[in-house]
Amino acid sequence: MRHFPLAPAFLCAASLFAQSAPIQPPPTTPGTTPAPAPEVTVTPGTHIPLALLNSVSTKHSVAGDRVYMQTVFPIMVDGRLAIPPGSYVLGVVTQIKRPGRVKGRAELYVRFDSLTLPNGTIREFRGRLSAVDGRGDEKLDQKEGAVKGDSNKADDMKTIGEAAITGATVGELASIPSHSYGLGAGVGAAAGAAAGLVAVLVTRGPDAILAQGSTVEMVLDRPLTFQDSELNFGPMSAALAASGPGPTAKGSAQKRSRFPF
């Protein structure tokens, strides 16, 4: 009687069973949830300097026109780069008010709609203007959020005065044959002043202009939150993190320097 070895047959059967048996997941503790992904939040009140890529004005723009801007300074959150320079901001002109002929300044209103980071991450947000370029004559009404053109009262008075002087000179020259110099000068001055007033009445005041290449400052009204994985900008992140923080929210422990216009 022949005996067959059982050990090899047993090992082969065990191997086939192990391959066919389903792999069971490791046991989990009841009530546990995955850890949330880390987030980076740019808080309300953060000031963001922007450069205009196109021009808008109360003379050539209408409500609904797009405003294209680009960030010019890195925005840091706890040492992490949140909004790098070169990010695109899209806005829209919401209201235009032309300057009056006698009174009333030009007014321009802009709304911010979206932010696009250099890596393609997009966020809709809400912000408002907090400063405009000091190189122009425009002023920002902080309460209304309107960019207002300069007043033209000084130029109007100058126009009337120059017209009166010119009229007086012409009147005096015209009165030489009759030797009525004072009367001629008075009549000429009155006529010149009237002509200057007419010129003022038919001429509008200065328009409000945000020129291409000028700078404005925007302040966030709501938090702007990103997932940590959305803020991968390559070597730029490490370089800017080492250079120090950017603008911070108003009222923070670190004093924010005024944006140099």
Image (spheres, grey):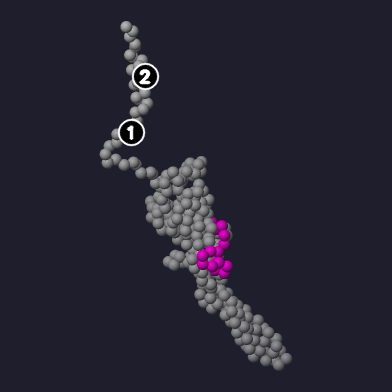
Instruction: Estimate how packed mark 1 is, as few (under 14), some (14 to 19) or many (20 or more) residues with alpha carbons within 10 Å.
Output: few
Residue at the farthest bottom position: 178
Q: Is residue 214 left or right of residue 256?
A: right
Displayed quadrant of residue 190: bottom right
Q: Quadrant of residue 12?
A: top left
- Label 1: element kind: loop
Give the x, y percent position of residue 115.
48, 54
- State the CA–CA distance, disc 2 to disc 1: 25 Å
Check residue 48 for magenta coloring.
Answer: no
Quick check: can you spot residue 250? no
Please give left or right for residue 180 compared with residue 46 in the image. right
Q: Which residue is mark 2?
A: 12
C-beta proximity under 8 Å, tags 2 and 1: no
Q: Residue at x 62, y 79 (%)?
A: 162
Residue at the farthest left position: 30
Estimate the x, y position of residue 33 in percent, counting from the top left: 31, 42
Name the residue located 43 percent from the left edge and 58 percent from the top edge.
126
Q: Amino acid at mark 2?
A: Cys
Q: Number of marks in the image?
A: 2
Please determine whether, in this image, residue 24 is positioned above or below residue 261: above
Numbered mark located on residue 206 in the image: none
Amino acid, disc 1? Pro
Q: Is residue 240 left or right of residue 159?
A: left
Main SS of the magenta part reads loop
Question: Can you tell which mark lies on residue 25?
Answer: 1
Mark toward the viewer: 2 or 1 = 2
The residue at the far top in this view is 1
| Displayed quadrant of residue 56 | bottom right
Q: Which residues are magenta?
A: 51-65
For the point 50% across and 57% down, the residue is 90
**Residue at the right extreme, as displayed:** 177
